[in-house]
Image (cartoon, coloured by chain):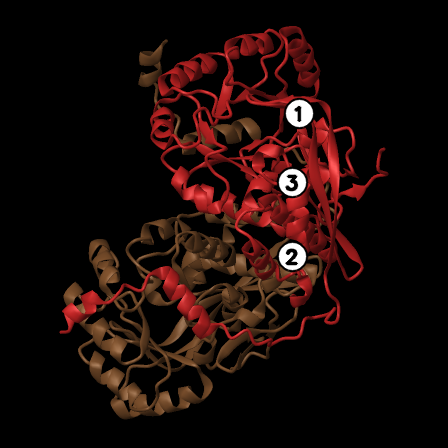
Chain colours: A brown, B red
Amino acid sequence: MKQNLCNRRTFLTASTFVAASTVFLKQNEVLTAPVANEKMAMKLSFRPYELKLNHPFTLATSTRTATPGVQVEIEFDGKTGYGEAALPPYLGESAESVSAFLKRINLTAFANPFETEDILDYVDKITENNTAAKAAVDIALHDLIGKLLGVPCYRLFGLSPQRIPPTTFTISIAKPDVIRTQTKDAAQKFKMLKVKLGRDNDKEIIETIRSVTDLPLIVDVNQGWKDKRYALDNICWLKERGIIMVEQPLPKSWWEEAGWLTERSPLPIFADESLQRISDVMKIKGYFSGINIKLMKCTGMREAWKMINLARVCHLGVMLGCMTETSCAIAAAVHLSPAVDFVDLDGNLLISNDLFQGVRLENGRQLPTDLPGLGIKKIEQQT
Amino acid sequence: MKQNLCNRRTFLTASTFVAASTVFLKQNEVLTAPVANEKMAMKLSFRPYELKLNHPFTLATSTRTATPGVQVEIEFDGKTGYGEAALPPYLGESAESVSAFLKRINLTAFANPFETEDILDYVDKITENNTAAKAAVDIALHDLIGKLLGVPCYRLFGLSPQRIPPTTFTISIAKPDVIRTQTKDAAQKFKMLKVKLGRDNDKEIIETIRSVTDLPLIVDVNQGWKDKRYALDNICWLKERGIIMVEQPLPKSWWEEAGWLTERSPLPIFADESLQRISDVMKIKGYFSGINIKLMKCTGMREAWKMINLARVCHLGVMLGCMTETSCAIAAAVHLSPAVDFVDLDGNLLISNDLFQGVRLENGRQLPTDLPGLGIKKIEQQT
C-alpha cells in the first residue's frame, strides 16, 4: 500500500533526522542545579607569546628561528587551567587570528567546566577553522578539570603513564658533520630518532645518521616524494637500514598512490598532512597504516582521544605529534600518549624560553608529573 | 630498485604492526608511583539476584515473569562501586556463567581503578563473550571512580544532565482493553511511548494506542517482519499515525534488505539485534539510520561512550536501551544519556524488588542525582 507515495518522499537522512530530533527531544531545561559554584563563571584570558628556537628549524620548504603562540588561561573556583595555541606559519593561524577568535568566546552561558562536550561544541562552531585556538581552550579546560578534581589528566582518560612509549627526537637537516654531532648527542638521551627527508640528499642523511647510531628511526617526508615507485624504492632501501616507519611520503591529496604504496610497503606508512580532524580518520583506512594526531590540528585533547579510539576501530596505528610548543601543550599530548604507538613530542625541548615545567625526559620518554591537571607549573619568564 | 623483492614481502598490516610495535615500545616499566593507595588493592565481590517483574514481559517469541541478574561490588580506598549484570535468557548468559567469569578476574595487578583502559582491556580478554558480566565490572568501576573523585559519572564524560531526552516507556502486548488502560496510565507520566510489534496484530495494537494518546511512539519489531516490501508498507502506514522511529524491523542478518528499507523509509530505522559492540558500528552505516546501544551487550559505559562517539562520526543516530535492570545499571545508562537522541531506559520501573534508589522519573525523563558516581544508594532488600 502507498508504496509509490512512500518512495517519492525524501529519505530522512541520519543527519537531518538528528537535527530534527534535537528540536524534538532536547528542551534544554535546567533540571539539576550545579553541585556547587552556581554563581561562579569561567573567566578566559590570553596573551601572545613568541617561542624562540634553540636552533633554526628546517623543513623541506622553509627555515625559521621562532614560532608565534598564544597562551590561554581559564579560571574557575580558585583554580587556573593553562592552554596554548602554537602557530607554525604553514597552518594559517597567527597570534592575531587566534586573539580575534578567543575574544569571541563567552563562557558565561556554562555553569561549570565539566560540561566539556557542550563547551567545546560551542567553541568549535564559532568558526570553521582556528584549530589551534580551539586546542588552546580545550587544553586549558582539561587542565582546569584535572585541578578541580585533584587528578592528573591521564586519569581523566583512564590511562596508565607506565605505558608511555619513548618519544622520537628530530635530527635537524644540516651538513654531515653537524648531523653526526647532533645524532651522537641525541643518541645519549633518546631511544628513537626522527629525521625529515624529501630533498635530494635523503640517502646521504640516512647514511650519516647510521654512521653514528643504530637507534630505531622514523622518517618524515612531509609530502616530499612525487612518484609512488620512487617512494617504494626508497622505503625498501630504508627498511634495510633499520627505519621503522615512514610519515607522509607522498603529496597529501594523492590517495590512490598512498593506497598503492601502503599495500606494497615493507614499512608502515602514516598519514600526517592527509588528515586533520576526526572526520578525516575513516577515509584514511585502506590508504595508510596509521595516523599522526596533533593537538593543534585536531582542536585539542578531547577530539584527539576520540580520534585514537576511532583509529583503533579502523585498525590504524596512532602517533602523537606536536609543533614547537611550551611544556603546556606538550604535557597535554603526553597525558594521552599511553594510548598510542608512536610518540613525537620533542617540541618543548627545542625552545629556549619555555613558560612551564612539568614534563620530564626520562629514559627517552616524555613523562607527566603526578600533579593535578596537566601537572605543569609556571616558571619565571626568561627575557 | 629491489621492487620485486619488495612486492613479495608480506605487507605489514596495521594490526601486526601494532602488535610488533607494542613489543618494541611498551616496556611496562612502572615509572611513577601511584599518587596514593599504593598498598591497597581493589576487591571484587558479587551475588546472584533475581529481578521480579511487575507484569509478565512479552516479546514476539516469549513471555517471562522474572530476570536473573548478578550484583557486583568493587571496593577501594573505603569506597564501594556498584555494578550489575542483567541476564535476559535470549542473550545466552546465566547467573552461573557470570559468576564463573567474575571468579576469574584478578584485580591485584592494577594499582588503582583509574587505570580503566588497562583494567577493562584485561577483563575483556578473559573470554570472547560474557558481555553482561563485563558490563557489571565496568559499571562498578565507573561508580567507584566517580565516588573517589567526588563527582557524578556524567561529569566523567563531560556531559550535561539538562540535555537528557525523555525516556520511552514500553506498552506491553495484551488485549485491547488492557493496552488502553496501560497507555492511559503511561501517558500521564511519560512523553514518549514504545511498543513491540512483529506479530499478526500490529495495526490493531497501534490503533488501540492511538485511541488513547497522540504521544510520539517508537515501534520495536524485534526482527519480526520477514519481507522488506511488507516492512516498507507498514512503516508508511505507521508514519501516518505519528510513529517517529522503527527498531530492527527485519531479521538481523538481512543487511541488503535493511539498506533497501532505510533508503526508502519515511521514518528512521535503528539497528538493535544487528549490532552488539563497537566493532559492529561501522558496518551499520549505509544500512540503518541509527543504533540502539545497550550496556549489557556492549560491555558497559566505557565502550558505550566510544560507540556514541563513533556513531556521530558515521552520522548515525543513537538510542540507549536496557534490559530488565535495577536502578544501578539504569543509572549507568542515564549518566550517558545526555549524549544520545533516544532514551529507552524504563527497566527499573518494571521490577518490584529494586535494590537501589537514585534514578528519578521527572517530566518523562529518567534523571540522575548529583551524588558522586552513579548517584545511587542501596535500599533495604525486599523479601
Residue B360 location, x and y as percent?
74, 33
Q: Are marks 1 and 2 in contact (CB under 8 Å)?
A: no
* Residue A220 in view, yes or no: yes
Tell if the residue under mark 2 belongs to the same chain as the one under mark 3. yes
The local crowd at label 2, few if under 14, some if 14 to 19, many if 20 or more residues have their Cα within 10 Å, is few
Residue B334 numbered mark, or none: none
Element on which disc 2 rests: loop
Residue at x 37%, y 67% (from the top left corner): A88
Q: Chain of mark 1?
A: B
Residue A343 location, x and y as percent?
44, 70
Amino acid found under the numbered disc labelled 1: Arg
Element on which disc 1 rests: strand
Residue B94 numbered mark, or none: 3
- Which quadrant of the view contains residue A186? bottom left
Q: Earlier in the sequence, mark 3 or mark 1?
A: 1
Amino acid found under the numbered disc labelled 3: Ser
Residue B240 location, x and y as percent?
46, 12
Amino acid found under the numbered disc labelled 2: Arg
Q: Is residue A124 left or right of residue B189?
A: left
Instruction: Name the residue tied to disc 2.
Output: B104
Q: CA distance from mark 1 to mark 2?
A: 30 Å
Q: Are marks 2 and 3 in contact (CB under 8 Å)?
A: no
The local crowd at label 1, few if under 14, some if 14 to 19, many if 20 or more residues have their Cα within 10 Å, is some
The local crowd at label 3, few if under 14, some if 14 to 19, many if 20 or more residues have their Cα within 10 Å, is many
Instruction: Name the residue tied to disc 1.
Output: B64
| Residue A327 drawn above or below residue B138 | below
